[in-house]
Image: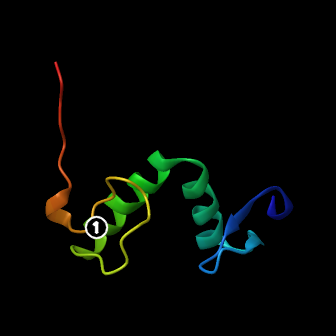
Amino acid sequence: MRAAFTFKDRIGAITNVYDGPTFANALQQQCDDFGRVRGIANAAKHLQLSNVRQVPNAPSHAANTDIIIKG
């Protein structure tokens, strides 16, 4: 698995996945929806994030998360 996934680190270098957080970074860079779910989970856990994810519409505070039911 490690060789199959890479991600861009903070300086933009392509790096192989080597643990859980780097695997999550690789998934987030491939799928914006994963980044949003990850941001919501972190916002709920910490109530306010100081490290906002680089994904469009990622929450920065628990107040920025809500459920919208269409129908």
- All told, the count of numbered labels is 1
Q: In the picture, which quadrant includes the C terminus?
A: top left
Residue 41 placed where, x, y %?
35, 61
In the rendered structure, which amino acid carries the disc numbered 1?
Ala
Q: Secondary structure at mark 1?
A: helix
- Above or below, comparing residue 40 to residue 10 in the picture: above
Q: Residue at x 58, y 63 (%)?
A: 24
Residue at the extreme top of the image, as rendered: 71
Residue 49: quarter of image: bottom left
Check disc 1: other Cα within 10 Å, few if <14, some if 14-19, many if 20+: many
Q: Residue at x 21, y 73 (%)?
A: 47
- Above or below, comparing residue 42 to residue 50 in the picture: above
Q: Nearer the viewer, residue 18 or 54?
A: 54
> For this view, does 60 lie left or right of residue 24?
left
Q: In the picture, which quadrant includes the N terminus?
A: bottom right
Residue 21: quarter of image: bottom right
Q: Residue at x 63, y 80 (%)?
A: 11
Residue 8 placed where, x, y %?
66, 68
Residue 59: quarter of image: bottom left
- Above or below, comparing residue 63 to residue 57 in the picture: below
Residue at the extreme front of the image, as rendered: 12
Q: Residue at x 31, y 81 (%)?
A: 50
Residue 22 placed where, x, y %?
64, 71
> For this view, does 14 lie left or right of residue 66?
right
Residue 3 placed where, x, y %?
86, 62
Residue at the extreme right of the image, as rendered: 3
Label 1 belongs to which residue? Answer: 43
Q: How is the image coloured?
A: rainbow
